[in-house]
Image (cartoon, rainbow, N blue to C red):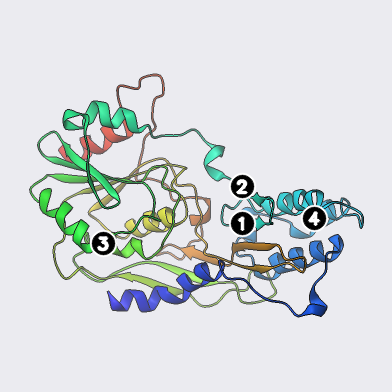
Amino acid sequence: MKKFFYTILPFALLAFASCEKIFFEDDQASADPLTNFEYLWNEVDKKYSYFDIKGIDWDAVKQRYSDSIRADMSDEELFRILGSMMNELRDDHTNLVSPFNVSVYNVALKSEPNYYERTVLENYMPNKQYMYTGAFSHNFIGDSIAYLRYGSFMSPVTNEDLDFILTRYANTKGLILDLRENGGGNVFNIPLILERFVETRTLAAYSQTRNGPGHADFSAETGFYYNPYDGLRYTKPVMVLVDRGSYSATTFFSLSTKAMDNITLVGDTTGGGGGLPNGGQLPNGWTYRFSITRLLDLGKQNFAESGVPPDTLASFNWNDLSRDEILDVAIDIINQ
């Protein structure tokens, strides 16, 4: 575990740094709308990590939005313009925060949902009940398959919880981990789970940080490794359910599973969020964040921001709420 954390720590700190206030000298402070517009546009231009994969002409964006900037515009008008400009990045790691509003892109609303908890609970769980262990809701499906729901990487994961769960389901044929509509959260929870499913030290992905003025200027690749947990592990087939609502840390998790032969992704392409965010403060005191790293697969391909595709494609049929087609596919794969 220590080796993994030494690798991931610098990048995790970038994410956590986005929550910290950055202070400016008095002579840098300004409420002038054009000054704040120019400052934000330049910060994104120098540091954002996904211009290439998204085909964004940032100069054209500046020209289009600068025509709307006026010296006498209200704070609400300026916020609307700056927030809209940031949303041109099509990135849920991009936010503008003022005392009266927060701009968000909300990638999950760009596609149909693929998860309905009531269908799972009423049609697959014994006695229509879950067990609740820490952040996980779980139970058997039939006699031989384990189902675990983890709704947010913001929820803490402990080894004690995982030990209880994996002991309870040790004799199952396979395990289903449902990460649909999991919008991400704490990246440190990723290895806590995945280290339970690997038997050897596993290189799973690479990361690069934007480090120069050119949109293609990046640091050398840094590898992400997962080491087997020194304790109880699960070596049988694992199905991970994902959809477009699976974002950020869930995309990172999903890309990592591509390096693990015993894990199969089932469902829809994840929502993206492959870059870790960092940010700062505008001269008028508003804060912002956006992605400054990019996540690469083992072939050093840069696609995670657009979403990680499933190994087996499936979708939820909202015309029949008695069945969960994505869950059914995962059950069938385990039973093969």
The answer to whether mark 4 and mark 2 are in CB contact below 8 A is no
Within-10-Å neighbours for mark 4: few <14, some 14–19, many 20+ = few
Q: Quadrant of residue 60?
A: bottom right
**Residue under circle 1?**
94
Question: Is residue 73 found left or right of 165 in the rendered image?
Answer: right
Q: Which residue is mark 2?
A: 105
Q: Which residue is mark 3?
A: 158
Q: Where is mark 4, residue-wise?
A: 60
Callouts 3 and 2 close, C-beta under 8 Å: no
Q: Amino acid at mark 4?
A: Ala
Instruction: Report the side of 65 relative to 84 (left or right).
Output: right
Separation (CA) of disc 3 from disc 4: 47 Å
Q: Mark 1 and 3 residues: CB-CB less than 8 Å, in contact?
A: no
**Three-letter amino acid code at disc 1?**
Thr
Viewer-nearest of labels 3 and 4?
3
Residue 29 image point, x, y percent = 80, 72
Name which residue type carries label 3.
Thr
Residue 161: horizontal and vertical position, in percent? 21, 57
Q: Nearer the viewer, mark 4 or mark 2?
A: 2
CB-based contact (under 8 Å), mark 2 and mark 1: yes
Question: Mark 3 or mark 2: which is in front?
Answer: 3
User: Mark 4 and mark 2: span between their CA atoms?
Assistant: 20 Å
